[in-house]
Image (cartoon, helix red, strand yellow):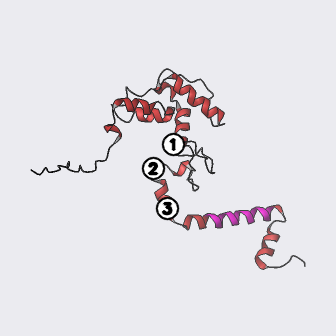
C-alpha cells in the first residue's frame, strides 16, 4: 500500500497591512513615535484614537528634542492638557514645516523626520506649495523666469545709473562710448 504524500496547497501571497497586526503590536509601534507622528497616527482612524498616547511626556520630549537640535520652539505659553490646546498656530506651523522637510539640513543624515536620510535638494518654498500654486508655476514654464531676469537687469541698471552719474552713464552704456568727450 503506497502512501501519498499530501502537501498542503500553496497559499496565495497575501499582502498585509498595518491593520492586520494585533493591537499589542500597534501599541508597541506607537511607543516609538515622536509627538507629531503619534498625533497623525492617532487621528488616522477610530481604531488608533484611544490606543495612541499623546500626553504631556510625549509633548515635552518633542519640545526638548527640538530645543537640543536648535530648531524653532514655541516660546509662548503652551497648554499641555489636550492636543487641541497644545497645537496652537505656532505649533501647527512648526509641524507643517516638519512634514514638508523644510527644517532639514541638505547633507547626508540631515533629515530630522527620517533618521539617517537626506532630504531632497530641490526644496520648493512653502508659499508655492499651497494648493495649485506649484502646478500653476510649472504651467507658466520659463517665461516668468526670463521676464523676472529682464526686470532684475533693468532695475539694476536703473539704480547704477542713478547712483553713478544719472542718465549720462545710461546713454554711454547704450551707445557704447567710453565717456571721454
Residue 157 picture quarter: bottom right
| Label 1: element kind | helix
Q: For the residues marked 1 and 3, what is the alpha-carbon distance in whole angstroms?
A: 22 Å
- Percent position of residue 63, x then y: 59, 30
| Mark sitting earlier along the chain (1/3) | 1
Q: In this view, does 86 lie to the left or right of 169?
A: left
Which residues fall within the magenta stretch? 148-162
- Percent position of residue 121, x then y: 59, 55
Residue occupying image coordinates x 60% and y 32%: 65
Residue occupying image coordinates x 24% and y 51%: 12
Disc number for residue 47: none
The residue pinned by badge 1 equals: 99
The nearer-to-camera label among 1 and 3 is 1
Label 2 neighbourhood size at 10 Å, few (<14), some (14-19), many (20+)?
few
- Percent position of residue 124, x then y: 55, 53
Residue occupying image coordinates x 65% and y 67%: 150
Residue 149 magenta-highlighted: yes
Q: Quadrant of the C terminus?
A: bottom right
Disc number for residue 138: 3
Figure check: 114 above or below 52: below
Residue occupying image coordinates x 52% and y 35%: 92
Label total for image: 3
The residue pinned by badge 2 equals: 131
Say whether marks 1 and 3 touch (CB < 8 Å).
no
Label 3 neighbourhood size at 10 Å, few (<14), some (14-19), many (20+)?
few
Residue 150 magenta-highlighted: yes
Amino acid at each position: 500500500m503506497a502512501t501519498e504524500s499530501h502537501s498542503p496547497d500553496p497559499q496565495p501571497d497575501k499582502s498585509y497591512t498595518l491593520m492586520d497586526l494585533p493591537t499589542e503590536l500597534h501599541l508597541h509601534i506607537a511607543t516609538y513615535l515622536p509627538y507629531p507622528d503619534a498625533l497623525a497616527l492617532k487621528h488616522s482612524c477610530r481604531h488608533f484614537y484611544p490606543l495612541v498616547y499623546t500626553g504631556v511626556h510625549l509633548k515635552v520630549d518633542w519640545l526638548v528634542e527640538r530645543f537640543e537640535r536648535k530648531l524653532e520652539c514655541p516660546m509662548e505659553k503652551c497648554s499641555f492638557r489636550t492636543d487641541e490646546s497644545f497645537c496652537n498656530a505656532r505649533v501647527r506651523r512648526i509641524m507643517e514645516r516638519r512634514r514638508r522637510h523644510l527644517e532639514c539640513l541638505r547633507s547626508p543624515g540631515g533629515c530630522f523626520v527620517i533618521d539617517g536620510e537626506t532630504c531632497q535638494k530641490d526644496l520648493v518654498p512653502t508659499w508655492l506649495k499651497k494648493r495649485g500654486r506649484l502646478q500653476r508655476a510649472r504651467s507658466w514654464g520659463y517665461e516668468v523666469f526670463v521676464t523676472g531676469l529682464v526686470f532684475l537687469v533693468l532695475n539694476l541698471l536703473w539704480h547704477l545709473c542713478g547712483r553713478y552719474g544719472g542718465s549720462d552713464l545710461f546713454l554711454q552704456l547704450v551707445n557704447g562710448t567710453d565717456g571721454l568727450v
